[in-house]
Image (spheres, rainbow, N blue to C red):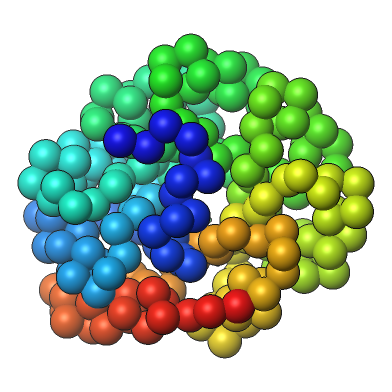
Amino acid sequence: AVTNPIELAGFGPVIPVIVLQRLEDAVPMAQALVEGGVRVLEVTLRTPVALQCMEAIAREVPDAIVGAGTVRSVADARAAFNAGCQFAVTPGYVSEIGLECREIGLPLLPGVATASEVMAANIDGFNFLKFFPATAAGGIPMLKGLAGPFADVAFCPTGGLTPQNAPDFLALPNVKVCGGSWLTPADAVQAGDWGRITQLAREAQALRG
Ligand code: 3PG
Protein backbone atom coordinates (compact mmCIF):
# COMPACT_ATOMS: atom_id res chain seq x y z
CA ALA A 1 0.00 0.00 0.00
CA VAL A 2 1.09 3.56 -0.68
CA THR A 3 1.86 5.49 2.51
CA ASN A 4 3.69 8.57 1.21
CA PRO A 5 2.36 10.08 -2.05
CA ILE A 6 5.90 10.56 -3.41
CA GLU A 7 6.00 6.76 -3.77
CA LEU A 8 3.59 7.20 -6.70
CA ALA A 9 6.46 8.74 -8.66
CA GLY A 10 8.47 5.54 -8.34
CA PHE A 11 6.33 3.46 -10.67
CA GLY A 12 6.98 5.34 -13.90
CA PRO A 13 7.06 8.76 -15.51
CA VAL A 14 3.34 9.18 -16.30
CA ILE A 15 0.16 8.85 -14.24
CA PRO A 16 -2.81 8.45 -16.57
CA VAL A 17 -5.79 10.70 -15.85
CA ILE A 18 -8.81 8.55 -16.65
CA VAL A 19 -12.47 9.32 -17.37
CA LEU A 20 -14.72 6.26 -17.41
CA GLN A 21 -18.25 6.51 -18.76
CA ARG A 22 -19.12 2.79 -18.43
CA LEU A 23 -18.48 0.46 -15.51
CA GLU A 24 -17.74 -2.45 -17.84
CA ASP A 25 -14.72 -0.60 -19.27
CA ALA A 26 -13.00 -0.16 -15.90
CA VAL A 27 -11.35 -3.55 -15.45
CA PRO A 28 -10.23 -4.15 -19.06
CA MET A 29 -8.86 -0.61 -19.26
CA ALA A 30 -6.93 -1.03 -16.03
CA GLN A 31 -5.61 -4.40 -17.21
CA ALA A 32 -4.53 -2.83 -20.52
CA LEU A 33 -2.59 -0.09 -18.72
CA VAL A 34 -0.97 -2.55 -16.30
CA GLU A 35 -0.07 -4.76 -19.29
CA GLY A 36 1.79 -1.76 -20.72
CA GLY A 37 3.67 -1.29 -17.43
CA VAL A 38 1.57 1.57 -16.04
CA ARG A 39 0.29 0.66 -12.57
CA VAL A 40 -0.66 3.98 -10.96
CA LEU A 41 -4.11 4.96 -12.24
CA GLU A 42 -5.97 8.18 -11.47
CA VAL A 43 -9.68 7.62 -12.09
CA THR A 44 -11.47 10.97 -12.02
CA LEU A 45 -14.69 11.53 -10.09
CA ARG A 46 -16.30 13.07 -13.14
CA THR A 47 -18.85 10.45 -14.07
CA PRO A 48 -21.67 8.74 -12.17
CA VAL A 49 -19.90 5.36 -12.40
CA ALA A 50 -16.48 6.58 -11.21
CA LEU A 51 -16.69 5.19 -7.66
CA GLN A 52 -17.93 1.82 -8.87
CA CYS A 53 -15.09 1.77 -11.42
CA MET A 54 -12.55 2.40 -8.65
CA GLU A 55 -14.05 -0.41 -6.56
CA ALA A 56 -13.94 -2.82 -9.49
CA ILE A 57 -10.31 -2.00 -10.30
CA ALA A 58 -9.25 -2.23 -6.64
CA ARG A 59 -10.95 -5.62 -6.36
CA GLU A 60 -10.07 -7.21 -9.69
CA VAL A 61 -6.75 -5.74 -10.84
CA PRO A 62 -4.32 -6.41 -7.99
CA ASP A 63 -1.31 -4.93 -9.79
CA ALA A 64 -3.07 -1.60 -10.27
CA ILE A 65 -2.68 1.19 -7.72
CA VAL A 66 -5.94 3.01 -8.15
CA GLY A 67 -6.54 6.53 -6.92
CA ALA A 68 -9.29 9.10 -7.20
CA GLY A 69 -8.83 12.26 -9.22
CA THR A 70 -11.01 15.38 -9.24
CA VAL A 71 -11.54 15.13 -5.47
CA ARG A 72 -13.28 18.43 -4.68
CA SER A 73 -14.72 17.92 -1.20
CA VAL A 74 -14.27 16.07 2.06
CA ALA A 75 -17.16 13.84 1.01
CA ASP A 76 -15.35 12.97 -2.23
CA ALA A 77 -12.22 12.03 -0.26
CA ARG A 78 -14.18 9.78 2.09
CA ALA A 79 -16.03 8.14 -0.79
CA ALA A 80 -12.75 7.49 -2.61
CA PHE A 81 -11.23 5.93 0.50
CA ASN A 82 -14.29 3.73 0.99
CA ALA A 83 -14.11 2.65 -2.67
CA GLY A 84 -10.64 1.22 -2.03
CA CYS A 85 -8.56 4.04 -3.50
CA GLN A 86 -4.93 4.12 -2.41
CA PHE A 87 -4.52 7.85 -3.05
CA ALA A 88 -6.43 11.00 -3.97
CA VAL A 89 -5.68 13.93 -6.26
CA THR A 90 -7.29 17.37 -6.01
CA PRO A 91 -7.28 20.00 -8.76
CA GLY A 92 -6.56 22.78 -6.22
CA TYR A 93 -5.69 23.07 -2.56
CA VAL A 94 -7.99 23.60 0.40
CA SER A 95 -6.88 22.79 3.94
CA GLU A 96 -10.12 21.10 4.87
CA ILE A 97 -9.53 18.31 2.35
CA GLY A 98 -5.80 18.07 3.07
CA LEU A 99 -6.41 17.58 6.78
CA GLU A 100 -9.25 15.11 6.22
CA CYS A 101 -7.05 12.95 3.96
CA ARG A 102 -4.36 12.94 6.65
CA GLU A 103 -7.00 12.01 9.26
CA ILE A 104 -8.39 9.03 7.33
CA GLY A 105 -4.98 7.89 6.06
CA LEU A 106 -5.53 8.59 2.37
CA PRO A 107 -2.28 9.74 0.67
CA LEU A 108 -3.00 13.02 -1.13
CA LEU A 109 -1.46 14.67 -4.17
CA PRO A 110 -2.86 18.19 -3.90
CA GLY A 111 -3.13 20.50 -6.89
CA VAL A 112 -1.55 23.96 -6.93
CA ALA A 113 -1.03 26.67 -9.52
CA THR A 114 0.48 29.56 -7.55
CA ALA A 115 3.14 30.25 -4.91
CA SER A 116 0.44 30.98 -2.32
CA GLU A 117 -1.14 27.58 -2.91
CA VAL A 118 2.26 25.89 -2.61
CA MET A 119 2.69 27.64 0.74
CA ALA A 120 -0.76 26.61 1.98
CA ALA A 121 -0.10 22.97 1.06
CA ASN A 122 3.40 23.07 2.61
CA ILE A 123 2.03 24.45 5.88
CA ASP A 124 -0.30 21.44 6.05
CA GLY A 125 2.64 19.11 5.43
CA PHE A 126 2.34 18.42 1.69
CA ASN A 127 5.59 18.72 -0.28
CA PHE A 128 4.74 16.66 -3.37
CA LEU A 129 2.17 18.61 -5.39
CA LYS A 130 0.31 18.41 -8.66
CA PHE A 131 0.98 21.49 -10.80
CA PHE A 132 -2.34 22.09 -12.53
CA PRO A 133 -3.29 23.08 -15.18
CA ALA A 134 0.37 22.83 -16.06
CA THR A 135 0.70 24.37 -19.51
CA ALA A 136 -2.00 27.00 -18.93
CA ALA A 137 -0.57 28.00 -15.53
CA GLY A 138 2.90 28.78 -16.83
CA GLY A 139 4.38 25.45 -17.86
CA ILE A 140 8.10 24.91 -17.67
CA PRO A 141 9.06 28.55 -16.91
CA MET A 142 6.67 28.53 -13.94
CA LEU A 143 8.13 25.27 -12.59
CA LYS A 144 11.64 26.72 -12.94
CA GLY A 145 10.46 29.83 -11.10
CA LEU A 146 8.92 27.84 -8.25
CA ALA A 147 12.16 25.87 -7.84
CA GLY A 148 13.84 28.94 -6.32
CA PRO A 149 11.79 29.53 -3.17
CA PHE A 150 10.45 25.96 -3.00
CA ALA A 151 13.64 23.95 -3.44
CA ASP A 152 12.27 21.07 -1.36
CA VAL A 153 8.97 20.75 -3.26
CA ALA A 154 8.43 18.16 -6.02
CA PHE A 155 5.76 18.53 -8.68
CA CYS A 156 3.58 16.37 -10.91
CA PRO A 157 2.62 18.66 -13.82
CA THR A 158 -0.73 17.74 -15.33
CA GLY A 159 -2.97 19.50 -17.84
CA GLY A 160 -1.89 20.05 -21.43
CA LEU A 161 0.90 17.48 -21.37
CA THR A 162 1.52 15.32 -24.42
CA PRO A 163 4.01 12.61 -25.39
CA GLN A 164 5.85 15.41 -27.23
CA ASN A 165 6.22 17.92 -24.39
CA ALA A 166 6.30 15.51 -21.42
CA PRO A 167 10.07 14.77 -21.72
CA ASP A 168 10.84 18.50 -21.31
CA PHE A 169 8.79 18.60 -18.10
CA LEU A 170 10.33 15.36 -16.83
CA ALA A 171 13.81 16.78 -17.36
CA LEU A 172 13.23 19.43 -14.66
CA PRO A 173 14.86 18.58 -11.31
CA ASN A 174 11.65 19.40 -9.41
CA VAL A 175 9.43 17.19 -11.59
CA LYS A 176 9.25 13.58 -10.43
CA VAL A 177 6.34 12.34 -12.57
CA CYS A 178 3.68 13.89 -14.79
CA GLY A 179 0.01 13.29 -15.51
CA GLY A 180 -2.05 13.19 -18.66
CA SER A 181 -5.17 11.90 -20.29
CA TRP A 182 -3.53 10.88 -23.56
CA LEU A 183 -3.01 7.24 -22.51
CA THR A 184 -6.75 6.59 -22.51
CA PRO A 185 -8.34 8.35 -25.50
CA ALA A 186 -12.13 8.38 -25.34
CA ASP A 187 -12.47 6.80 -28.79
CA ALA A 188 -10.21 3.87 -27.85
CA VAL A 189 -12.18 3.25 -24.66
CA GLN A 190 -15.47 3.57 -26.53
CA ALA A 191 -14.27 1.01 -29.09
CA GLY A 192 -12.75 -1.32 -26.47
CA ASP A 193 -9.41 -0.96 -28.25
CA TRP A 194 -7.37 -2.18 -25.27
CA GLY A 195 -4.39 -3.04 -27.45
CA ARG A 196 -4.02 0.62 -28.36
CA ILE A 197 -4.15 1.61 -24.70
CA THR A 198 -1.48 -0.96 -23.83
CA GLN A 199 0.69 0.47 -26.60
CA LEU A 200 0.18 4.06 -25.37
CA ALA A 201 1.01 2.88 -21.86
CA ARG A 202 4.23 1.22 -23.06
CA GLU A 203 5.28 4.39 -24.86
CA ALA A 204 4.49 6.53 -21.81
CA GLN A 205 6.36 4.19 -19.51
CA ALA A 206 9.42 4.52 -21.77
CA LEU A 207 9.45 8.36 -21.66
CA ARG A 208 12.46 9.93 -19.99
CA GLY A 209 13.30 13.46 -19.12
C1 3PG B 1 -7.53 16.76 -16.46
O1 3PG B 1 -7.88 17.54 -15.63
O2 3PG B 1 -8.30 16.23 -17.28
C2 3PG B 1 -6.12 16.38 -16.45
O3 3PG B 1 -5.35 17.43 -15.99
C3 3PG B 1 -5.62 15.92 -17.76
O4 3PG B 1 -5.45 16.98 -18.59
P1 3PG B 1 -5.07 16.66 -20.08
O5 3PG B 1 -6.31 16.15 -20.74
O6 3PG B 1 -4.64 17.99 -20.64
O7 3PG B 1 -3.97 15.64 -20.06
Furthest-bottom residue in this view? 164
Q: Using the image as rendered, state which of residue 20 and residue 123 is in the foreground.
A: 123
Q: How many marks?
A: 0
Q: Using the image as rendered, state which of residue 102 and residue 94 is in the foreground.
A: 102
Q: Quadrant of the C terminus?
A: bottom right
Q: Quadrant of the N terminus?
A: top left
Residue 4: x and y, percent? 48, 35
Q: Is residue 159 left or right of residue 121?
A: left
Vertical placement of residue 111 versus 107, above or below: below
Q: Quadrant of residue 187?
A: bottom left
Residue 127: x and y, percent? 67, 38
Q: Quadrant of residue 148?
A: bottom right
Residue 95: x and y, percent? 67, 21
Residue 202: x and y, percent? 31, 79
User: Is residue 26 something that shows in the picture?
Assistant: no
Q: Using the image as rendered, state which of residue 53 and residue 102 is in the foreground.
A: 102
Q: Quadrant of residue 144?
A: bottom right
Q: Is residue 54 left or right of residue 16?
A: left
Vertical placement of residue 55 versus 165, above or below: above
Q: Residue at x 22, y 64 (%)?
A: 34
Vertical placement of residue 97 versus 51, above or below: above
User: Is residue 116 something that shows in the picture?
Assistant: yes
Q: Is residue 135 left or right of residue 130?
A: right
Q: Residue at x 71, y 31 (%)?
A: 121
Q: Residue at x 42, y 15 (%)?
A: 104
